[in-house]
Image (cartoon, rainbow, N blue to C red):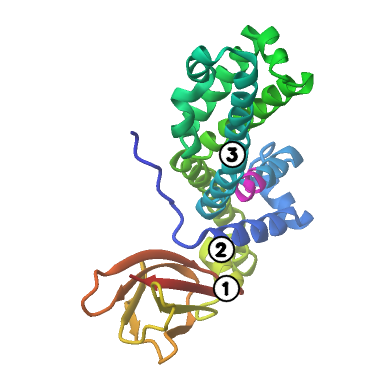
């Protein structure tokens, strides 16, 4: 498996998008745009500006890890319901087999209709549900006379086909959402494209506004970052609870550190709450140390204007 791409921008994704939106607004100001175009005629055109905006929109609209995971879990819940319906269809077919075939071949026909895969299918083996649906569909086509004699209503065949189709469609979508790494890589690549565009605009701006430092600030990435995400303008709250009881965990040491900052640490209060106020917007490595327990390590984006909070269960 190829390694996933890494983010080339030195701040959070939310901050990247805010910087890009701000730079685009400044770029579109007629006086600014005219100077960029004078420096590089034919580059800073309406289609070029639209392209910048479209690349930003594409990056924003791609789902992140949390969204991908949520979609996948939602589909799993829906699959359980659809799979149950398919398995229930098999139990109904057994009743028609009982009345439509002689007693000495009933068990043989059960197996032919899907009995050999039913147990696995009923325990959420999705491939076996697919197999069960095919076996039931084939069986109904093979024995219309016997099943009709067994009192199978005409609409039941269409129900089995429809339920199988609904399951297959949902299962295909479910499998596609398993590719979290692929989707994450696409999101990072799209973000990096936005950042590369900002770097190129910044480089041109240093030429265009070399004698106008105040206007230049509108296109210098770190200058814009300080405006949209000022130092000390973010916060992170952490709640620790014990697994099973949901009681607060107070005897812990919590350490956070961004790639560009110093480590900060604190201990939770008697409610298991810890707060890091007036910190910089950034991506933080978070470590939870509880005596007698393995360390818990995770990563959290903390953005200005967003109430970042983590609820962590201690096993």
Q: Earlier in the sequence, mark 1 or mark 3?
A: 3
Q: Is residue 184 above or below residue 280?
A: above
The residue singled out by tag 3 in the image is 84
- Quarter location, residue 83: top right
Kindly state the secondary structure of the residue where label 2 is placed.
helix
In front: mark 1 or mark 3? 3
| The N terminus, quarter of image | top left
Q: Nearer the viewer, residue 297 or 284?
A: 297
In the picture, measured across the screen, residue 44 lies left or right of residue 117, that is right
- Circle on res. 304: 1
Label 1 Cα crowd, 10 Å radius (few <14 / some 14-19 / many 20+): many
In front: mark 3 or mark 2? 3
In the picture, measured across the screen, residue 254 lies left or right of residue 134, that is left
Residues under labels 2 and 1: Cα distance? Answer: 8 Å
Identify the residue at image location x=56%, y=42%: 80
Residue 159, image x, y percentages: 72, 26
Mark 1 and 3 residues: CB-CB less than 8 Å, in contact? Answer: no
Identify the residue at image location x=58%, y=75%: 307
Identify the residue at image location x=51%, y=34%: 175
| The C terminus, quarter of image | bottom left
């Amino acid at each position: 498996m190829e390694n996933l791409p890494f983010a080339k921008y030195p701040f959070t994704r939310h901050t990247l998008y805010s910087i890009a939106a701000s730079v685009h607004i400044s770029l579109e100001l007629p006086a600014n745009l005219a100077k960029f175009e004078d420096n590089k005629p034919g580059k800073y055109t309406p289609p070029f500006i639209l392209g910048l905006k479209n690349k930003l929109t594409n990056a924003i609209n791609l789902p992140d890890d949390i969204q991908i995971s949520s979609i996948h879990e939602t589909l799993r819940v829906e699959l359980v319901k659809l799979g149950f319906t398919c398995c229930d269809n098999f139990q109904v077919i057994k009743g028609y087999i009982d009345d439509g075939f002689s007693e000495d071949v009933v068990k043989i026909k059960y197996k032919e209709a899907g009995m050999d895969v039913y147990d696995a299918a009923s325990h959420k083996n999705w491939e076996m549900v697919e197999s069960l649906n095919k076996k039931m569909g084939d069986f109904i086509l093979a024995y219309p006379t016997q099943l009709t004699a067994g009192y199978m209503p005409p609409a039941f065949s269409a129900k089995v086909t429809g339920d199988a189709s609904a399951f297959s469609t949902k299962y295909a979508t479910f499998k596609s959402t398993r590719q979290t790494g692929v989707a994450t890589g696409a999101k990072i690549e799209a973000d990096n494209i936005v950042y590369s565009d900002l770097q190129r605009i910044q480089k041109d701006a240093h030429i265009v506004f070399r004698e106008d430092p105040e206007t230049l600030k509108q296109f210098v990435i770190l200058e814009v970052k300080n405006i949209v995400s000022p130092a000390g303008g973010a916060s992170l709250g952490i709640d620790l609870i014990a697994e099973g009881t949901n009681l607060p965990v107070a005897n812990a040491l919590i350490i956070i550190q961004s790639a560009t900052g110093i480590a900060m640490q604190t201990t939770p209060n008697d409610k298991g709450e810890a707060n890091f106020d007036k910190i910089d917007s950034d991506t933080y490595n978070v470590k939870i140390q509880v005596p007698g327990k393995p360390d818990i390590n995770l990563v959290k984006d903390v953005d200005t204007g967003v109430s970042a909070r983590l609820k962590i269960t201690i096993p």
